[in-house]
Image (cartoon, rainbow, N blue to C red):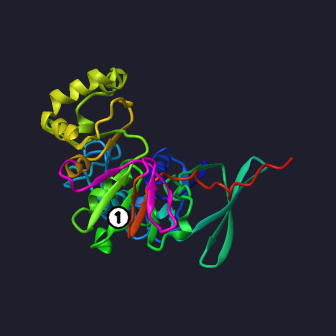
Amino acid sequence: MNIAIIGAGPAGIISARNAIKAGHSVVLFEKNTRIGGIWNPWSGGAYRNACMQNSRYTFHYTGFPPGDIDEFPGVEQVFRYLSAVAGEDALRESIRLNTEVVSLRKDAGHRVIRCASEGKDTEDIFDRVIIATGELWQPRRPPLPGEENFSGTLITSRDYQEPEAFKGKNILIIGGGVSGADIASDLVPFARSVSLSVKKMGLYLPRQFPTGPNDMMHSYLGRCLLSQMNYEDFIGYLDTMMPDYMQAYRASSLLPDMANNNAVHVNEKIIPNVAAGLIKVKPQAERFTGEGAIKFVDASQEKYDVIITCTGYEMPDYSFIRKRTA
């Protein structure tokens, strides 16, 4: 069977590897000049100091251990790992870099892909197509009324790369998810001040528990049971497992009265930073004032030099898929 795979990120690479091992003919299309998807340090979406939420024991592909890397590998290490996998002979030969799929249509039971590469368009016919283009590319940024009054820098988490660029700035991060907590903590050593605007408080737990990496602590069944535990009992379990961390958590005033046990933000820096007064927590941002300050839902106002929105991503763009015609 001839199989096309669109996107040479983590999902595309392992899909190609498995299809080749199963005896299929594979072409792996990648529009950038390097593989890796968001873990491509040159054109991916991950900021420089990002690292995996999964440990080195669980993030890797079956049959291809990662070797000697950090417990929670960063961008460069993940990219090198993916490059090593993609460097296997048959897989390497299947990859077409700098080749963008511009359309996909169905014709007489086959899938026809039109590609653009170096100014030339070509068409190829396949039996099956796997779309592995990922989801974290187009940031969602809900507009704040009065944006025209803000004279500072306003970017999304997708545009953020390194903290040194914001040295000495007063910064507001909007969004209390993983990216927001990561970037706020990343900026602490360089910024004049860092504030984090949180609409709904969630649970922040560290990558490393006292007895090992958090993703190695329980079997899948154990994780399922923890997710079904009532919140009060779950907090009691965490108090037993990590008493020092939970003490700092309460001191930070970030511990929610109620939260979903199964929706945890993995970050080990945000709680100590807030508890130490290095990150100021603000409620939901409401709008800009006429003077360019941010007004929050509690009626407080603050002025900032830089605002970074970490409010998720839009649905992937699949407009290259042609609708079937009668």
Name the side, left or right, on which 154 lies relative to 215: right
Is residue 86 visible in the rendered image? The answer is no
**Residue drawn 57% across and 69% down?**
99
Q: Quadrant of residue 278?
A: bottom left
Q: Nearer the viewer, residue 131 or 176?
A: 176
The residue under label 1 is which amino acid type? Ile
Q: Nearer the viewer, residue 214 or 84?
A: 214
- Residue 161 horizontal/vertical position (percent): 36, 67
Magenta-tinted stretch: 275-299
- Residue 8 horizontal/vertical position (percent): 48, 59
**Residue drawn 27% across and 60% down?**
186
Q: Nearer the viewer, residue 9 or 305?
A: 305
Secondary structure of the residue carrying tag 1 is strand
**Residue drawn 22% across and 32% down?**
217
Q: Residues within 10 Å of mark 1 (few under 14, many from 20)?
A: many
Give yes or no for residue 312 being in the magenta stretch: no
Q: Which residue is labeled 1 in the image?
A: 171
Q: Nearer the viewer, residue 272 or 281?
A: 281
Name the side, left or right, on which 70 lies relative to 39: left
